[in-house]
Amino acid sequence: MQNQIYKGGRDQEIIELFIQTFSDSEGKKEGLLIGELVRNLLDRTPPQDLRVFLSTEEEEVIGGVFFSRMRFENSATATWLLSPAAVQTRFQGMGVGQNLIRFAHDCLREAGAEMAVTYGDINFYSKVGYQPVTIDIVPSPQPLSYPEGWIAQSLRREKLLPISGRSFCVEAINDPVYW
Ligand SMILES: CC(C)(COP(=O)(O)OP(=O)(O)OC[C@H]1O[C@@H](n2cnc3c(N)ncnc32)[C@H](O)[C@@H]1OP(=O)(O)O)[C@@H](O)C(=O)NCCC(=O)NCCS
């Protein structure tokens, strides 16, 4: 298993990984919805606002994680939103996801990132450092239908200080259906 920063040329394989993985875990409709999100992230996001990390096994993509830039009205904290993440169903539960996300955090940190945020299951994401936050600490770009899933971490081992005002995510994920 190898982790790498995605440099292009495998969009379709990545989209299919997300469709298949989410269809297996949450049904076909969710699989297609997440596949559309991934396609839009790849097609519509300015390169400076998107980082994609892949886990490969013998040249096959077995895992992927997307980070897109978040911005704040009142803060310059360099922040990346993790969403979505997937590990091929048959490779799940073997440490691939945690390993890939740690690799991604290291790469982002080296490039100056200060905070990572995501919206998901704390039972998994707490294993890679995420802690619940309220929107008074990190404002969400859209209203949250599941506030318990709003989680974040400093990539600088510092306490998160409250950020006031509005926040903004990239266009592809700025749709209430994902929040
Ligand atoms: C969530 C996911 C990315 C994790 O990757 P993975 O390689 O399977 O995870 P790892 O093997 O590194 O870690 C497994 C640990 O996380 C937990 N875990 C795995 N998937 C989980 C999930 N969907 N929800 C909660 N906990 C989960 C397991 O209990 C396991 O804990 P343990 O090590 O104490 O037994 C992967 O299972 C997946 O693609 N799931 C379907 C799609 C999804 O839910 N994506 C995340 C939302 S964006």
Image: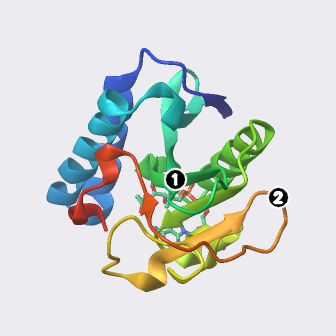
Q: Position of residue 101 (x, y in %)?
A: 64, 50
Viewer-closest of 37 and 114? 114
User: Which residue is disc 1 drawn over?
Assistant: 71
Q: Secondary structure at mark 1?
A: strand
Q: Is 56 above or below relative to 150?
A: above
Q: Position of residue 4 (x, y in %)?
A: 64, 29
Q: Residues within 10 Å of mark 2 (few under 14, many from 20)?
A: few
Q: Is 84 above or below relative to 121?
A: above
Quadrant for the C terminus in the image = bottom left
Q: Residue at x 22, y 43 (%)?
A: 36
Viewer-closest of 130 and 76? 76
Q: Quadrant of residue 132?
A: bottom right
* 1 displayed left or right of 143: right
Viewer-closest of 11 and 99? 11
Q: Quadrant of residue 37?
A: top left
* 70 displayed left or right of 147: right
Residue at disc 2, CB closer than 8 Å to ligand 1: no
Q: Position of residue 20 (x, y in %)?
A: 29, 45
Q: Residue at x 46, y 70 (%)?
A: 120
Amino acid tagged 1: Arg
Quadrant for the N terminus in the image = top right
User: Which residue is disc 2 drawn over?
Assistant: 156
Q: Which mark is residue 24?
A: none
Residue 16 seen anywhere in this rendered image of the structure: no
